[in-house]
Amino acid sequence: MLGDVLLGAATGDREPFSDAAGRARASLGLPSVRCWCVVLVDGLGWHNLSGRGEHAPFLTGQLTAQTGAGAPVTKLAATLPTSTATNLSYLGTAQRAGATAMLGYAVRNPATAGLLNLISWNGGADPGTWQREPTVFEQMLASGSLAVSIGPWQFEDSGLTVAALRGARYHPAESLPARVDTAIAQLRDPGVDLVYLYWGELDSIAHQHGWEGADWAGGLARSIPNWSVWRGCSRWVPACWSPLTTA
């Protein structure tokens, strides 16, 4: 399940900070490494990658290679409804929408009787009290571990970040290559126990043009040089880390 990814990666090679974290790590079949780099590719999923795989030979090759006994899980299920707010919260808390109150794109705010947009956060609610479940990053902090979150500057203190991903040290980086470089720099730091990188460009293209057209395919193809960086990361960072990609 998508909700297992961040929680399962959070403990690295350390003792799980909760039974749920231990179960998540086991369910994904994750090997023991000191620090995972979790890359969330918003706007990419199993079905559209399978349908446009010729534009992403590196990714499809990685999926093909991960087969056989002991291989990590390669296909995960999102939770319903499959909106960004709901599933980013599912990733960030390992809890479904009924627990997080992140029930879709927009919901009725009982305090105002108006609509609350769970992406822009227009509608008057405090994200820290609307979504009350502890995030994976908060659980890591409580156990003495440090997570780093990397994404565009405008997301650092956004309502959705506070609701779903609070508790990490945020490093803003605008372009995709800058985010990859920032991730590599953070993975060199022995005090960092988990790196999370948000990759949202494909989602923006899909909302504007759909995922079946040339624009989305071009965006996927342009991402390949950044994916290929992971092949050679051992030259710049210690070998005790590993990338974990989900969508």
Image (cartoon, rainbow, N blue to C red):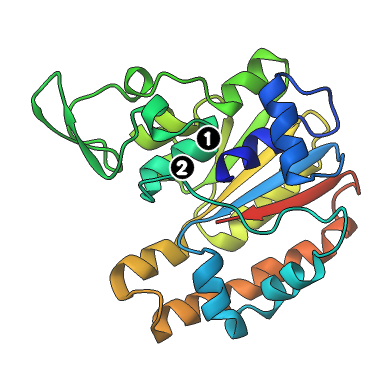
The residue lying at 14 percent from left, 18 percent from top is 111
Vertical side of 171 occupied by 109: above or below: above
Specify whether residue 10 is in view: no
The residue lying at 71 percent from left, 21 percent from top is 19
Which amino acid type corresponds to the residue marked 1 in the rendered image?
A: Gly
Vertical side of 34 occupied by 56: above or below: below
Indicate the quadrant where residue 2 lies.
Answer: top right
The residue lying at 66 percent from left, 47 percent from top is 38
Q: Nearer the viewer, residue 2 or 41?
A: 2
Residue 230 position in % (x across, y down): 76, 62
In the picture as drawn, the residue positioned furthest to the front comes out as 69
Determine whether, in the image, residue 136 is placed left or right of residue 37: left
Residue 181 position in % (x across, y down): 68, 55
Label 2 crowd bin: few (<14), some (14–19), many (20+), radius 10 Å: many
Vertical side of 222 occupied by 116: above or below: above
CA gap between label 2 and label 1 equals 6 Å
Indicate the quadrant where residue 3 lies.
Answer: top right
* Image quarter of the N terminus: top right
In the picture as drawn, the residue positioned furthest to the left comes out as 113
Determine whether, in the image, residue 93 is placed left or right of residue 146: left
Residue at mark 1: 92
Q: Nearer the viewer, residue 94 or 233?
A: 94
Q: Identify the element where label 2 is drawn.
A: helix
Indicate the quadrant where residue 101 lies.
Answer: top left
Residue at mark 2: 88
Contact (Cβ within 8 Å) of mark 2 with mark 1: yes
Residue 155 position in % (x across, y down): 42, 42
Label 1 crowd bin: few (<14), some (14–19), many (20+), radius 10 Å: many
Which amino acid type corresponds to the residue marked 2 in the rendered image?
A: Leu
